[in-house]
Amino acid sequence: MHEICSICGRTADPAEDGDPPLTWCADIVETRDGPHTRWVCAGCTRRYVRSIEAKLEQQWW
């Protein structure tokens, strides 16, 4: 398998990341060709999560 991060384009290295990549996030998206797995690397996942947390209202915490 050669998973690619849908945000930054990084290709997973099976030796470093595992096969499938264990620290990456994956979700299923519907396309014209049917369901497709979308991968996001650990680095982009961390950046994205921090962005969401920063936008939450103070009362959430």
Image (tube, rainbow, N blue to C red):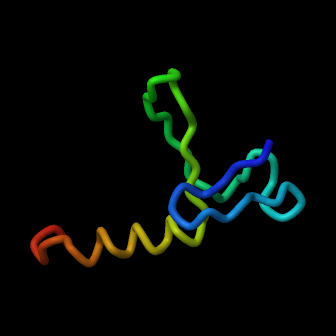
Q: Is residue 9 left or right of residue 48?
A: right
- Residue 45 in picture, x, y percent from top left: 50, 65
- Residue 41 in picture, x, y percent from top left: 61, 62
From this view, report whether residue 30 is shown above or below residue 51.
above
Residue shown at the point (54%, 44%) measured from the top left: 38
Q: Is residue 28 left or right of residue 61?
A: right
- As rendered, which of 18 and 29 lies closer to the eye? 29
- As rendered, which of 10 and 42 lies closer to the eye? 10
- As rendered, which of 23 and 58 lies closer to the eye? 23
Number of numbered discs: 0
Quarter of the image where one finds residue 37: top right
Considering every residue shown, the one lying at the far front of the view is 32
Q: Quadrant of the N terminus?
A: top right
Q: Quadrant of the C terminus?
A: bottom left
Q: Is residue 14 left or right of residue 55?
A: right
- Residue 57 in picture, x, y percent from top left: 12, 73
Residue shown at the point (21%, 74%) measured from the top left: 55
Residue shown at the point (56%, 52%) measured from the top left: 25
Residue shown at the point (45%, 34%) measured from the top left: 29
